[in-house]
């Protein structure tokens, strides 16, 4: 069992979980549940849920009329 303490700003360090986001829920009994989470934009969600939009964007990206600027090193 590990003990975790908050600092003066109510922050806590979760060892082994660097740069992660969590949804936090405080239960009626005072326990705290952390669920790993990712933030997704509305546009990304629309893309992920629409095979038609995925196909349309894939065809557009593959079109010879689309030019992508080259990165300079």
Image (spheres, rainbow, N blue to C red):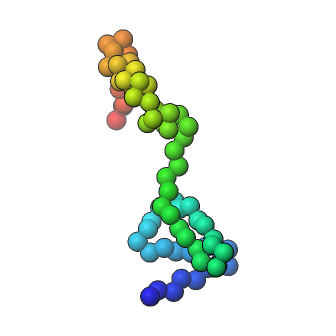
Residue, x 58% and y 83% (percent of image)? 5
Residue, x 45% and y 35% (percent of image)? 49
Q: Position of residue 43 (x, y in %)?
A: 53, 34
Q: Residue furthest top?
A: 65
Q: Residue furthest front?
A: 28
Report the number of numbered marks. Answer: 0
Give the camera-side residue of 7 and 58: 58
State whether residue 44 is above or below residue 51: below
Q: Is residue 62 left or right of residue 20?
A: left
State whether residue 12 is above or below residue 56: below
Q: Is residue 58 left or right of residue 32?
A: left
Q: Position of residue 27 (x, y in %)?
A: 63, 72
Q: Quadrant of the C terminus?
A: top left
Residue 39 in view, yes or no: yes
Q: Position of residue 9 (x, y in %)?
A: 67, 74
Residue, x 44% and y 88% (percent of image)? 1
Give the camera-side residue of 4 and 70: 4
């Amino acid at each position: 069992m590990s003990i975790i303490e908050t600092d003066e700003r109510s922050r806590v360090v979760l060892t082994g979980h660097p740069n992660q986001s969590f949804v936090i829920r405080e239960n009626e009994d005072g326990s705290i549940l952390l669920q790993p989470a990712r933030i997704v934009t509305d546009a990304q969600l629309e893309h992920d849920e629409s095979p038609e939009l995925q196909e349309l964007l894939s065809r557009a990206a593959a079109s010879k009329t689309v030019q992508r600027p080259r990165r300079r090193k």
